[in-house]
Image (cartoon, rainbow, N blue to C red):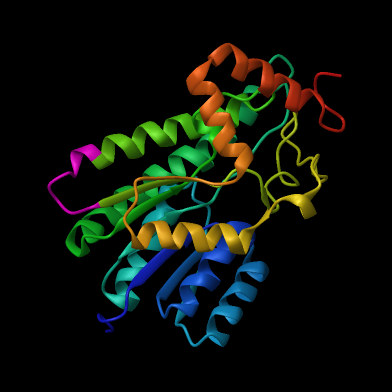
Amino acid sequence: METLKKCSLITGASSGIGQALALELAKKGHNLVLMARNAEALQQTIQECHQSGAKAIAVIGDVSKDSDCQAFVDRAIQEFGRIDALYNNAGISMRALFRDAEVSVLESVMATNFWGTVYCTKYALPHLIESKGSVIGVSSVAGFKGLPARTGYSASKFAMHGFLESLRIENRNTGLHVLIACPGYTASNIRKTALNAEGQTQKESPLNEKKLMPASEVAQHIVKAVEHRKTRLVLTFQGKMALLINTVSSKLADWVAYRVISKEPDSPFR
């Protein structure tokens, strides 16, 4: 049983930021336990981690299921005997006005984004306290400012923030580190897999993905923030400006958010 190298767990590791985090940590020599629903894509991530010389294990599972999260953590302890960091990265979004959306859409988003974080953190927590490790929530500026046509997504991220901030305060004297990372718009699949009003994936991103921050760059920033044990990370100029404007004037921030979303291709406001 290996106990010297750090062991990092990442959810949603088959693509986007989760995959980029896995590759970044693999280069740093971490042992990795990676979870996702897409077995084929996850195996590709595993192979790329192996090419960097890292030990990486795939766990096929759904973070919205309590039992899958427990099995995820149990596998890490079985294989490596420790957990040094848990990256709660798995997430889905939505794009529909609340008046048009099925309630089940909000429930699905909350189940993955919020309850997935709760389940994984619950099972990993004793091991993370023992190692004085880190819990990371890969979140969004939508967790600080509600976004129109993203009611379920914003609600889930607000809930994640409240949970993680409370967890941080509870563990002031245990050595546990908690980071809330808000990447801003990142080139990833999250907009393509966002749910519409009926709960179907929208398939096409409303943004020009090529102009967004690459997932690899986001991963580098997050890993560095963990190494420095920061409590909050906000990336991209747009993300930082959104928080600043909301601090100065919530009414102005409301107007900006409405204007930005309403100008998206095929905006729900049209």
User: Residue 215 or 93: which is nearer the viewer?
Assistant: 215
Figure check: 130 above or below 235: below
User: Residue 246 or 171: which is nearer the viewer?
Assistant: 246
Q: Residue at x 66, y 68 (%)?
A: 41
| Extreme residue in the left direction | 173
The answer to whether residue 37 is visible is no
Q: Residue at x 49, y 88 (%)?
A: 53
- Which SS type dominates the magenta stretch? loop
- Relative horizontal placement of residue 103, taking residue 65 as reference (left or right): right
Give the x, y percent position of residue 33.
44, 70
First to last magenta residue range: 169-176
Q: How many marks?
A: 0
Q: Residue at x 67, y 34 (%)?
A: 94
User: Residue 1 or 52: which is nearer the viewer?
Assistant: 52
Could you say which quadrant of the image residue 239 lies in?
A: top right
Q: Residue at x 79, y 42 (%)?
A: 207
Q: Quadrant of the C terminus?
A: top right
Give the x, y percent position of residue 190.
67, 47
Give the x, y percent position of residue 192.
76, 46
Q: Is residue 198 magenta?
A: no
- Relative horizontal placement of residue 83, taking residue 158 as reference (left or right): left
Figure check: 60 above or below 181: below
Q: Quadrant of the N terminus?
A: bottom left
Give the x, y percent position of residue 107.
56, 30
- Relative horizontal placement of residue 103, taking residue 55 as reference (left or right): right
- Relative horizontal placement of residue 34, taking residue 125 as reference (left or right): right
The answer to whether residue 206 is visible is yes
Figure check: 3 above or below 150: below
